[in-house]
Amino acid sequence: MRRPFALTVLCVAVLLLAGCQAPGSPTDQTDPSGDDLTPDSSAVDYGNDGSAPAAPDEDRLGYENGYWYNESLSVTTDDGLNETERDAVVARTMARVERIRGLEFQETVPVSVISRAEYRNNTAGGEAGESLRRFDNAKFEALFFIGEDRDSIAVQNSNRGESVLGYYSSRRGEIVIVSDSETPTISRGTLAHELVHALQDQQFGLASDARTRDEVQGRNGLVEGDAVAVTQAYTGRCGEEWDCIDRPDTSSGGGGDRHFGINFMQYFPYSDGPGLISDLREREDWSAVNGAYDDYPDGAVEVTYPERYPGWEPESVSLADRSSDDWERVRPSTDRNRPDYAVVGPSAIASSMAYTIADDYNESAVVGTRDVINYEDGSLDSDDPYNYDLPATDGWEGGRMHVYDNGSETAYVWKTTWTSEADAREFADAWAAVIAHWGGTRTAAGQWVIEEGSPYTDAIAVRIDGDTVTIVNAPTTDELDEVHDA
């Protein structure tokens, strides 16, 4: 069953997205390439002098609900936007989004406002079943993101609750602005970004068949990359071609303790997605982007390496259950229409490695800052801030993870396949460094034991067989073969 999709804008450490501001980032992003993102279409250029003609006899690109894309607005932003002002801003922003994207809105997009407290309450994650929680906890433990003493779903929801400025709900067909004021000051980037999602939904539909995290990273690379590219073009025209509303600085969210590793992973579609859009537009302009909604990228690989789209397909990885009777497979709630296994792809692996430069457990790191953070002329590259193309991940072809439970503790088996034996070895060596970073010591038998006091105290075996790497986790070394008898 295809599921409706909710798209959010996340502010993450040292990053900027759609009006979310963070240290070292400008308030608005521009299109540094100078590329004119206006599509070849039947849109008429009415000039940029702020004067607009009368309403057209029929709707057309660049005109929405009484406002042309280049029309001036008279609104007061110091005290936020009242409902009338908000309607005007939304209408003109819709006109500008369709002007850039070359697609017509089919209907007006409602915009509502909720408080941050209400948003936190709505995303508390209380409905997740115990099986799903144990499965998700083990998966995030396998990535060395969240230890056994914390709830992974709660941590992810907390991250979102503190950083989201707005989102588009395809189920309701509306944009929701998260604000603590009934008359919010809406970031032009946030509004434009979410309106692109509404336009995508009206033109192509955003229901998704993506069922694993890596599949979601692939489809989101297209969806979010499209929205980011249009938003960059929009903000780049402010002050040059278009009059844009000056507004007070807006908060980047509710503060809180954000998890760098999880944020890094969640930011992947926003950072690498625009590169996919640029590559598609070089092939056939916006028509290539439009066509991609009928053939979403199959995973993060096709977003990180756009030249591999659409020919690349992930390898289907088989993983036999070889556990003893003491261990039973953990299967997420069946009512979630999700598989009973995980696919942890290259963007997640890169994020785990990047997390070692920011965690407070160990001063060591398995990558350098400039390996995963992109700088341009000495400053953060706000258009492409994170790098997910690492030597230890670029040969990923497929994977599968199973989670097990003995009634009191969990374990996992994670199998990945690689382009070559050399790629498999490179990943295994890099992952051994990650294990060591978190307190792991190799035993005489070649297994790993993670020290007491680490959030991940356990035993781990890393087994290489040609172009395949299998990682087994259990509470003790004696239990490794009970979880997966190799």
Image (cartoon, helix red, strand yellow):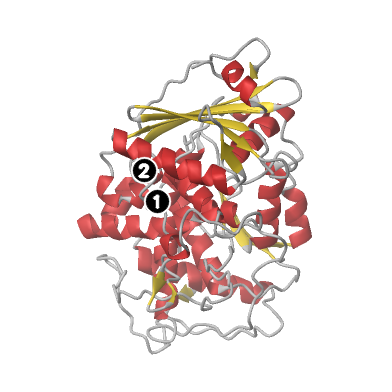
Image position of 121 (left or right of 367):
right
**In the image, what residue occupies the spot 33% across and 41% down?**
395
What crowding class fits label 1: few (fewer than 14 Cα within 10 Å), some (14-19), or many (20 or more)? Answer: many
Vertical placement of residue 354 versus 301, above or below: below
Location of residue 322 (image quadrant): top right
Asked whether residue 161 appears in the rendered view, the answer is yes
Residue type (three-letter) at the residue carrying disc 2: Pro
Mark positioned earlier in the residue sequence (2 or 1) = 1
Where residue 222 is drawn, which disc sits there? 1
What crowding class fits label 2: few (fewer than 14 Cα within 10 Å), some (14-19), or many (20 or more)? Answer: many
Asked whether residue 59 appears in the rendered view, the answer is no
Image position of 42 (left or right of 136):
left
Residue type (three-letter) at the residue carrying disc 1: Leu
Q: Nearer the viewer, residue 314 or 177?
A: 314
Vertical placement of residue 299 versus 382, above or below: above
Where residue 414 is drawn, which disc sits there? none
Q: Position of residue 393 (x, y in %)?
A: 39, 45
For disc 2, the marked residue is 297
Q: Position of residue 450 (x, y in %)?
A: 63, 38
The extreme front residue here reads: 444
The extreme left residue here reads: 283
**In the image, what residue occupies the spot 62% across and 57% down?**
359
The extreme bottom residue here reads: 49
Q: Nearer the viewer, residue 248 or 261?
A: 261
Location of residue 424 (image quadrant): top left
Q: Are marks 2 and 1 in contact (CB under 8 Å)?
A: yes
The extreme top residue here reads: 325
Q: Position of residue 202 (x, y in %)?
A: 46, 51
The count of marks equals: 2
Alpha carbon distance from label 2 to label 1 = 7 Å
Q: Position of residue 34 (x, y in %)?
A: 30, 77
